[in-house]
Image (cartoon, helix red, strand yellow):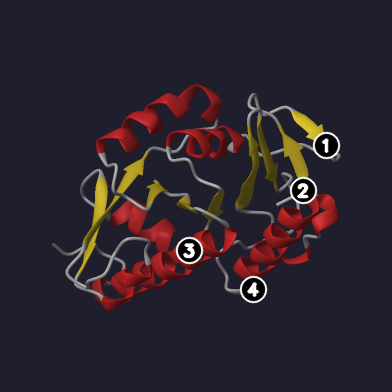
Amino acid sequence: MNFAELAAQLAEVARYCHARGWAPGTSGNFSATMSREPLRLVITPSGVDKGELTAGQMLGIDERGQVVSGSGRPSAEAALHLLLAQAREADAVLHTHSVWSTILSEAAPEDGLAIEGYEMLKGLAGVDTHLHREWLPIVENTQAWTESSFAVEQVLSRYPATHGFLIRGHGLYTWGQDVPEARRHVETLEFLLEVMGRKRGATWQK
């Protein structure tokens, strides 16, 4: 797909996530891979209200995170989008800041969160049973993702089957082979996180 088509898809997803309360205000960032040789991403600009985002505001960035089309600047987390586009061959990466992903990322007593036994797990690519156990690793938050992306890559290499990860006190990252699949993963994981949060309450119970 070309820049304009991907930009339109991402703007629609961003507005949808805002409407669901998963990307309030200027939070969240969303990208899609336009090409791999050379690597080029379409990505949301930093500091823009996702509820009013338009395709015309999207940026194009290269493999170093430098803007090659559009005006504005990408989030510092663009480094994570570039990492996922390469390490997971993701064609779309979506990052949300929901209430439940934030609460559970802090409440989990370990370095990750296990989700199992729910029918909705079948919304994740390659999962065909509610008996699936999804492990969402939790990584520490930072303001220097360019320098810290290697640590995230190491975490992802330890859990090759995961469909996402949480940043502690921050939110959810997930991805897909295209924007619709990534959107389905966001819907699935956000639903499951809310179920777990409501079931367990604000205080984590083993």
Task: Say the numbered circle drawn on residue 181.
Answer: none
Can residue 144 be seen at all in this image of the molecule?
no
**Neighbour tally class for label 3: few under 14, some 14-19, many 20 plus, Cα within 10 Å:** many
Q: Which residue is mark 1?
A: 69
Q: Secondary structure at mark 2?
A: helix
Q: Does 102 sit left or right of 94 as displayed?
A: left
Q: Which residue is mark 3?
A: 186
User: Where does the image place residue 157, in percent across and percent down from the top left?
Assistant: 31, 34
Q: Does 124 sit left or right of 17 as displayed?
A: left
Amino acid type of disc 2? Phe
Q: Which marked residue is nearer to the observer: mark 2 or mark 1?
A: 2
Amino acid type of disc 3? Val
Contact, CB < 8 Å: mark 3 with mark 1?
A: no
**Neighbour tally class for label 4: few under 14, some 14-19, many 20 plus, Cα within 10 Å:** few
Q: CA distance from mark 3 to mark 4?
A: 13 Å
Q: Which marked residue is nearer to the observer: mark 4 or mark 2?
A: 2
Nearest to the observer: residue 192 or residue 26: 192
Q: Is residue 31 above or below residue 100?
A: above
Q: Secondary structure at mark 4?
A: helix
Q: Which residue is mark 2?
A: 3
Q: How many marks?
A: 4
Q: Which residue is mark 4?
A: 19
Q: CA distance from mark 2 to mark 1?
A: 10 Å
Contact, CB < 8 Å: mark 4 with mark 1?
A: no
